[in-house]
Image (tube, rainbow, N blue to C red):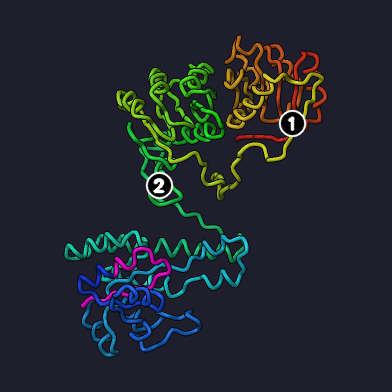
Amino acid sequence: MPKAILSVHDKTGLVEFARGLAGLGWELLASGGTARLLRENGLTVTEVAEYTGSPEVLGGRVKTLHPAVHAGLLARATDADAADLKANGWDYIDLVAVNLYPFEATIAKPDVTLADAIENIDIGGVTLIRAAAKNHERVTLICDPADYPAVLGALKNGAIPAELRAKLALKGFQHTAHYDAAIAGYLSNGAYEALELYPVQKLRYGENPHQSADLLAYHPGGGPLGGRVLQGKEVSYNNLLDLDAAWRAAVSFERPNITIVKHLSPCGIASADQLAEAFTAALASDPVSAYGGVIAANRAVDGAAAAEMAKLFVECIAAPGFEPAALEIFAKKKNLRLVEMPDLKIEPQFELRSINCGVLRQAVDFGDPAGGEWKVASKRAPTPGELKALHFAWKACQYVKSNAIVFAVGEATVGIGGGQPNRVDCVRIAAQRAGERSKGAVMASDAFFPFPDSVEIAAQAGITAIVHPGGSIRDAEAIAAADAAGMAMLFTGVRHFRH
């Protein structure tokens, strides 16, 4: 009769699983709490303490740590190992269902003590996992209740395939690695960091065809940007970078928003009552650059918006959903990649960037910190219309590569200049993109003006109001240039570089 040992903290699905094993003729061994639950549900079970002849000790710290258990798990299907077991009065154990004390949930509590954390470091469970996983040629490990149905199904079909045992063993080693990393991180007070990544797909190539590339996720089973591809060609390395940039911008706006990105640079950003209106306004910002770019929407794409988007050649569209009418329209564009996002969250709330021999980590820039206050620096205060446009331009500016300049009218960009090593050139680029639309527009700058020349060029283009962090030793010169042109100028006190 095959034997299974059950020792779980999370008892989800356990009774049904154990009942299935018993129905197939398995003998059940279980540790104290697990055994009680099974008996309460009418199942015959032998307690580990009875099986080993050694009681649980140290308040439950030692339950399954016994040679009768671990020799039964680690024994190979050889005459020599079988003889060793028999000489000691032990037997083979063929399956382990185990999960661990909730260490991460414990340390996440605001009032957790070191003693609480220590008591939630699992020892016996980790040892069961490693023993079963090491000997997966013979033993089946289940450390995730979600795998109970697959194992029972395989047993009902005759046997558990070697491929499934190997897959479950790998899952066990991944689980204990994650568990130990959490413990080490907590006890080291940040002196130890572990980065866990899970392969999503092998990409055709990186930024260029001669560069290999992979997509990795922070969680197993993740998709591109955490979403799923509904149609189109396989997303590329560059598609993913552009989609990420567009998505981060779009979801930062509360009203329906469209952001169009090309080569990591926004071409147009606009908000409106309807997505179709927002798309038309965003496209008008720079229709030449938008060709071949990507689009992100912070609302489900409806038929009206899809009809407008379909007129433009783009590589990808990301949105929290696509209505049936939109899917029908996009289905005619077979290569167009549609990525459906699960929600509007940006996760994780930190960013990693690779540098030579190291990694940089920083918190995500979610905009101005709470409690900040804009100050009017010029003689003239902005009109209500200018102030509304300035708030939009300021937010849009945060998603443009530094040096970043945004011209906006209402809730739409009309000219974007960024990525240049000097700010005055970015003002010229934004003015060139905007053309006549710059007359009466407002301007946002992600950092202060080191000289008044940027303000003077903006005035020549017809800009009426400017927002920037302030803080330059030459602020007075920039303010004087604004006053001379009759412009309003506001300081935010917050910088938003994006390198």
Relative to residue 351, is residue 432 depicted above or below? above
Relative to residue 460, is residue 402 depicted above or below? below
Residue name at image x 37 percent, y 65 percent = 143
Label 2 crowd bin: few (<14), some (14–19), many (20+), radius 10 Å: some
Res. 1 mark: none
> Could you say which quadrant of the image residue 33 lies in?
bottom left
Q: Is residue 34 visible?
A: yes
> Could you say which quadrant of the image residue 445 lies in?
top right
Estimate the x, y position of residue 429 in percent, counting from the top left: 61, 18
Relative to residue 392, is residue 355 depicted above or below? below
Residue name at image x 52 percent, y 62 percent = 104
Res. 374 mark: 1
Q: Is residue 355 visible?
A: no
Residue named by callout 2: 222
Mark 2 is on which residue type? Gly
Which range is magenta? 1-18
Estimate the x, y position of residue 440 in percent, counting from the top left: 66, 13
Estimate the x, y position of residue 422 in percent, counting from the top left: 67, 25
Distance from the alpha carbon under mark 2 to that under mark 1: 40 Å
Q: Nearer the viewer, residue 319 or 288?
A: 319
Disc 2 to disc 1: CB gap under 8 Å: no
Task: Please state if 392 lies on the left or on the right of 88 as rendered.
Answer: right
